[in-house]
Amino acid sequence: MTAKEQAIAARNACRTVQTLDSADRVDAMHRMADALVAHADWLLEENAKDRTVAEQQVATGDLSPSLAARLKLSKARIDSLADGLRAIAAQDEPLGRVLKRTELASGLNLRQETASIGVVLVIFESRPDVLPQLAGLALRSGNGLLLKGGKEAIHSNRAMFKVLTDALAPLPAELFGLVETRSDVGALLSLDDTIDLVIPRGGNALVRYVQNNTRIPVLGHADGICHIFVDEAADPQKAQEIVLDAKTDYPAACNAVETVLIHKDYPAAPELLKRLKDAGVNVFGGPAAAKAYALPEADSLALEYSDLAVTVELVDDVDAAIQHIHTYGSGHTDAIVTESDAARDRFLAAVDSACVFHNASTRFADGFRFGLGAEVGISTGRIHARGPVGVEGLLTTRWKLEGTGHTVGPFSRGEAEWTHRALP
Amino acid sequence: MTAKEQAIAARNACRTVQTLDSADRVDAMHRMADALVAHADWLLEENAKDRTVAEQQVATGDLSPSLAARLKLSKARIDSLADGLRAIAAQDEPLGRVLKRTELASGLNLRQETASIGVVLVIFESRPDVLPQLAGLALRSGNGLLLKGGKEAIHSNRAMFKVLTDALAPLPAELFGLVETRSDVGALLSLDDTIDLVIPRGGNALVRYVQNNTRIPVLGHADGICHIFVDEAADPQKAQEIVLDAKTDYPAACNAVETVLIHKDYPAAPELLKRLKDAGVNVFGGPAAAKAYALPEADSLALEYSDLAVTVELVDDVDAAIQHIHTYGSGHTDAIVTESDAARDRFLAAVDSACVFHNASTRFADGFRFGLGAEVGISTGRIHARGPVGVEGLLTTRWKLEGTGHTVGPFSRGEAEWTHRALP
C-alpha cells in the first residue's frame, strides 16, 4: 500500500472501530498487552539488532550515547508497557461521554458527546516504547494511527507494530499504519482531507519541518525555554533544590530549566550559582547577571541549551520576571520559587504558559507525572490541547439533536418558542 | 500603527485584561452595551452611507440584493445587540474555571484551569452586526481581537468599532484592532507567533484562501454539504416538512440541505419531489434518482448549491446513506428522518459529522439555536472546537501546580511516591 492508501484505509478502519462497543476495543487492548508479553523474546531479539547498529554508530561518533541508550528494551520494560495498555483499557470509556445536554425547545433535545478525532499521524524519534503507548491511546479513543518512527529503531518498531497489529483481529488491522520513509511522510503531510492531526514528537527541527510542510493541524512544541523565577522571598534551600533538579535531572528534556531569573534583592544568589557550578552546569549571564557575578554573557536570552548549561539573569521584581518570560519564553513551563503569597498569586495569574508552577521543579510537566496515564505529547499551542496531552488530545465532540419533526420556520415566525434549558 | 503593531498591541493588552477581575471585564461589557444604545443615531447614519453605496451597486448589478439586505442596521437591531452584550456579561465567568484537580503527591497539587487563547483574528463579510458580538465574546473571555470586515460595511464597521473601543476605557483600547486592507490581512496571517487563531467567516473562497496562506490555526468551515436521509420508515409528513424547511428557509446558509438521500423503498418519494418542485426548488438527481424519476442529473454528488436547488439520490439502506455521506459530505450537519429506533441509532452512532440530527431540520445547526449565546463561527474541523462555536472556542487551558519545594529526583529514585488522586 502507498502511504496515501494506508491513510485512507486507516480512515475507513477507524469509522468501523468507532461504531463498535467499548468492550470490543477494551478486549483488543488486552489482546495487545498479552501479545507483547507473549512475544517478548522476539521483540528483544529485534531490538538487539537496532542496538548493535547503534553501538557501532556510537563507536564511530555517528550517534550520541544518550540516544543509543534510549533504544534499549528489556523484559521488564515490555511487561510495564503491557501493564500500561491494561491501565489505558481500564480507564473510563472516552467515547460518547455526554458533555452537555440542552433542551432547545419542547421535544427538541441536544447533546454534545465526545468522539474520536479520526486519523492521527505521529512522527517520533528512536524510543521504541513510544509505539505501544500511542497504539493503546489511539485504539482506546477509536482513532486511526499512522506511525513514523526513527530509523535507529526500525527493527524494534517493525516488530512492535507487527505484534500489536496482529493482536487487533477481528478489528481491522488497517487501523494502524507504519510508514518508514521520508517521502511517505511528505505524502502524508499533504493529505489534509484524510489526516486530522499530526503530532511530531522530537527535536525542534522536526517540529518546524512539520509545521512548515502541512495544512493539517499540528500538536506539539517547537521550543522548551522554561524559566524559574527565584523571588526575593524564596526559601534558599527550596530554590537551590528546585533549580538543580530542573537543570540536572535530565538536561535534554523539554521541561528542563533554561533560564533562572533571580530577584535583584534575593540574598542567596551566590550560593545558588555555586551549587549550579558545583553540579557541572555551565552558567551564563544575561547582561545584568553577567556584570554582577562576572559570568560569561549568554548569546541570547532565548536559548534552549538542552544540556548542562543555563542562563541566569537578575530582574527587578515579579512583574519584570513575568515580562521577561513573555518576551523570551516559549510558553511551555515556568515556575516561581517564593514564600510570598502575593508574588505567587501574581505569577500564577499572569504567566501565560501551558504550565505555571509554584515551588516545584519544571520537570513535573509530563503526562505521566500529571496523572494522565500515557502521553501523546506536550503542546505549547493554545488550540485544542495545551501542556501534557493524554487521551483527551485524541478526542473531539459531536452534537446530536433529536426532534420529532422540528423545523426552524415556526421559530422564525414566532409560532414556536425556544426553551434553551440545561438538562442534567 | 501597522497591522503587525496592532497585533502586538492586542497581545499586550489581552495579557493586561486577563489579570483583571471578572467584574472589570463585565463592567466594560455594560459600558459597551450602553454606548451602542447611546450612539444609535450616529451608527444608523454611518450605516446609511454603506446602504446608499450598496443600493447603487444593486442597481448596476454589482451586488446581490440579499447581500445588500444583510447590511441593514435598525434601532431595534442595535437594542438587541446591546441586550446580547448584556447577556454575554451575565454568563458564568469563563476564565479560571477549574476543570480538573489532582493531588500528584503529598503536598503537590495540580489544577487545570480555563484561560484565554490570546489574540484572535476574525475575517468576516458584510454584516455589521457581527462586530459587536465578536467584541463581546472576546472581551468576556479576555482575548485580543483583530477584525477585518467586508468593504461593503466599512462605515458601519468603523462606527461600531469606535463606539465599542471608546467604551473599553480604563481597559486598554488596543485590545481590539480594526484592519481594512487586504495587505493588512496578509501581514497578519504571517504572524503565527503573535496571533493564535484565525476565524474566517464567509464563503468557501475566503476560507480556502486563509487556510492556504497561514500557519496560524484556522477555525471554520469551507463547505456545508449537508444531507438529509429519508429512511424507509420515515413519517412522510415529517420528511416533507423537514426537507422543505432545510432547503427553503435560507438556501444560502451553510446549514441548508444540499443532498436528500431517499431509501429505495420509501413509499412517498414522488410526493416529496413534488413538494420540493412546488416550492420552486430545482431538483437534480444522482444516477439512480435521475433514472427513476426522470430528473436532470446533478453535475456532482458533492455540490453546495447555496440556492433553491437540491440533489436527490436513492440509496439501498441506512448504511449506504452513511457511506454516501462519508464519501461526499463535508462533515457539517447531516440528518435522518425515520420512525425506526434501529435506523436512528445506527445513523447517530456512525455519521462522523459535527452535527448529526434525527427528525429535525439541518437549519438548527447554529450557535444561537444551540443555546450558546453568540457564535464565533461554525467549525467542520475536528481540532479544538467542532460545530457551532460559542465562547468556549475562545478558551484554552493552563495547568497550575503548587508544591512546597518538590523536585522529581526523589520520585525517580523511589524515595517519594505518586498519589495521583483526583480532588473534588
Image (cartoon, coloured by chain):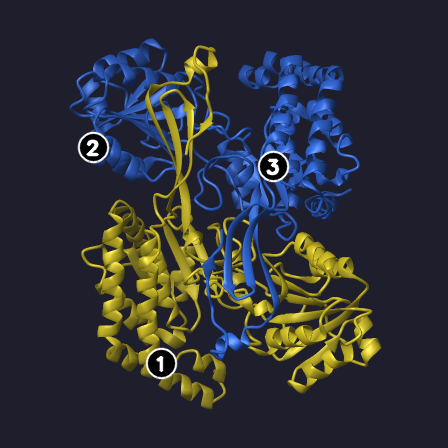
Chain colours: A blue, B yellow
**Amino acid marked by disc 3:** Val
With B87 as the anchor, is A398 left or right in this view? right
Q: In the rendering, at what x and y percent does residue A70 appear?
A: 58, 18
With A237 as the anchor, is B123 left or right in this view? right
Residue in the foreground of this view, choosing between B175 and B384: B384
Rendered image: mark on residue A342: 2
User: From mark 3 to mark 2, how far is it between C-alphas?
Assistant: 42 Å
Q: Nearer the viewer, mark 2 or mark 1?
A: 2
Question: Which residue ends up furthest to the bottom in the rendered image?
Answer: B59
Residue to which mark 3 is pinned = A122
Residue to which mark 1 is pinned = B50
Q: Dividing the picture into quarters, in which one does residue B245 lie? A: bottom right
Q: In the rendering, at what x and y percent does residue B218 appear?
A: 49, 54
Residue in the foreground of this view, choosing between A113 and A330: A113
Residue A98 in view of the camera:
yes
Q: Is label 1 on the same chain as label 3?
A: no
**Amino acid marked by disc 1:** Asp
Residue A177 in view of the camera:
no
Q: Residue at x 55, y 14 (%)?
A: A65
Looking at marks 3 and 2 on the same chain, the residue that comes earlier in the sequence is marked by 3
Q: Residue at x 75, y 34 (%)?
A: A168
Q: Chain of mark 2?
A: A
**Amino acid marked by disc 2:** Ala
Q: Dividing the picture into quarters, in which one does residue A243 lie? A: top left
